[in-house]
Image (spheres, helix red, strand yellow):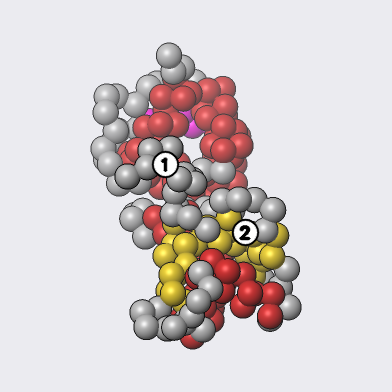
C-alpha cells in the first residue's frame, strides 16, 4: 500500500502528464513535502512533478504548507527542470543529425521508447531519457544484402565510431553525447519453439 508521500507524488505525476488525478491530493506535512521533493529528485522526475504541482495549484486542488525550505526546494525543482529542458533539446539536435545521416545512407529509423514517446507528453522536454533506442530498416529497393542492423553498425564504424556488439539484442555506440542502442530485432524473442 502506498504512503501519503507516494500518493502525493503519483498525483503530481498524473497531473504532470495531462491527466486528472483520481481522488483527493493527500494532506502532507512540511516533512512529507520535503520527502516528496527528495523522492522525485532521486527518481529523476522533477520536471513532470513540477508540471503537476502547478497544474493542481492552478485548479485549487493543492494546498502546500508555506515553509522557507519548501520554497527553496521548489526553486531547485525549477532549476532542475530548466537544466533538463536544455539537455533534452541538445539530445533532440543530436537525434535529428543522426537520423539524417542514417537516412542519407539508405536506412529508415524507427525510434523506440524514450525520445520517441516524449512527443506525447504535455511538455516533451520534460521526458528525460538516458539513451536512444532504434530499430533500423533498409529503404525499399536499396539492393543491399546486409541487414539494416549490420549496415547501421558498419556506417558508424566507417565514420570512426566504436560499436559494442557483445549484447545479442542490440549493439551500442555513442553519437556525440548520446548513447544509441541499435536493436537487432524488434522483440527480444529469438525464435519460436513451435515450427509452422
Question: In what element is the residue under mark 1?
Answer: loop
Q: Is residue 66 magenta?
A: yes
Where does the image place residue 177, in percent across and percent down from the top left? 66, 66
Q: Residue 135 at what x, y percent from top left? A: 47, 62
Residues in magenta, as a range: 63-67
Residue 126 percent coordinates (x, y): 46, 54
Please name whichever residue, 105 or 196, is drawn nearer the observer in this view of the structure: 196
Q: CA distance from mark 2 to mark 1?
A: 22 Å
Quarter of the image that includes the C terminus: top left
Between residues 158 and 86, which one lies in front from this camera angle?
A: 158
Most foreground residue, 59 or 100: 100
| Nearest to N terminus: mark 2 or mark 1 | 2
What label does residue 171 carry, if any? 2
Quadrant of the drawing holding the N terminus: top left
**At 73% across and 78% down in the image, what residue appears?**
160
Q: Mostly what secondary structure, the magenta segment?
A: loop
Q: Secondary structure at mark 2?
A: strand
Q: What residue is shown at x 66% (from left), y 71% (from top)?
A: 176
Q: Is residue 43 visible?
A: yes
Vertical relation: 182 (above or below) 75 = below
Pick the front one: 150 or 55? 150
What residue lies at 42% left-to-right and 41% top-to-bottom? 192
The local crowd at label 1, few if under 14, some if 14 to 19, many if 20 or more residues have their Cα within 10 Å, is few
Quarter where residue 153 is shown? bottom right
Horizontal and vertical percent position of residue 121: 36, 53
Left/right of residue 1 with respect to residue 102 in the rendered view: left
Q: Which residue is mark 1?
A: 192
Amino acid at each position: 500500500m502506498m504512503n501519503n508521500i507516494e500518493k502525493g507524488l503519483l498525483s503530481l505525476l498524473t497531473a504532470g502528464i495531462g491527466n486528472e488525478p483520481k481522488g483527493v491530493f493527500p494532506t502532507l506535512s512540511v516533512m512529507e513535502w520535503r520527502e516528496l521533493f527528495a523522492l522525485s529528485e532521486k527518481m529523476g522526475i522533477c520536471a513532470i512533478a513540477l508540471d503537476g504541482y502547478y497544474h493542481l495549484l492552478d485548479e485549487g486542488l493543492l494546498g502546500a504548507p508555506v515553509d522557507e525550505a519548501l520554497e527553496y526546494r521548489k526553486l531547485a525543482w525549477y532549476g532542475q527542470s530548466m537544466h533538463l529542458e536544455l539537455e533534452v533539446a541538445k539530445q533532440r539536435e543530436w537525434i535529428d543529425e543522426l537520423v539524417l545521416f542514417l537516412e542519407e545512407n539508405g536506412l529508415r529509423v524507427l525510434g523506440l521508447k524514450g525520445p520517441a514517446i516524449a512527443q506525447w507528453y504535455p511538455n516533451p522536454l520534460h521526458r528525460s531519457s538516458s539513451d536512444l533506442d532504434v530499430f533500423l530498416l533498409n529503404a525499399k529497393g536499396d539492393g543491399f544484402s546486409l541487414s539494416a542492423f549490420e549496415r547501421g553498425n558498419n556506417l558508424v564504424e566507417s565514420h570512426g565510431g566504436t560499436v559494442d556488439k557483445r549484447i545479442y539484442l542490440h549493439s551500442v555506440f555513442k553519437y556525440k553525447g548520446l548513447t544509441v542502442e541499435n536493436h537487432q530485432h524488434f522483440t527480444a524473442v529469438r525464435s519460436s519453439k513451435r515450427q509452422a
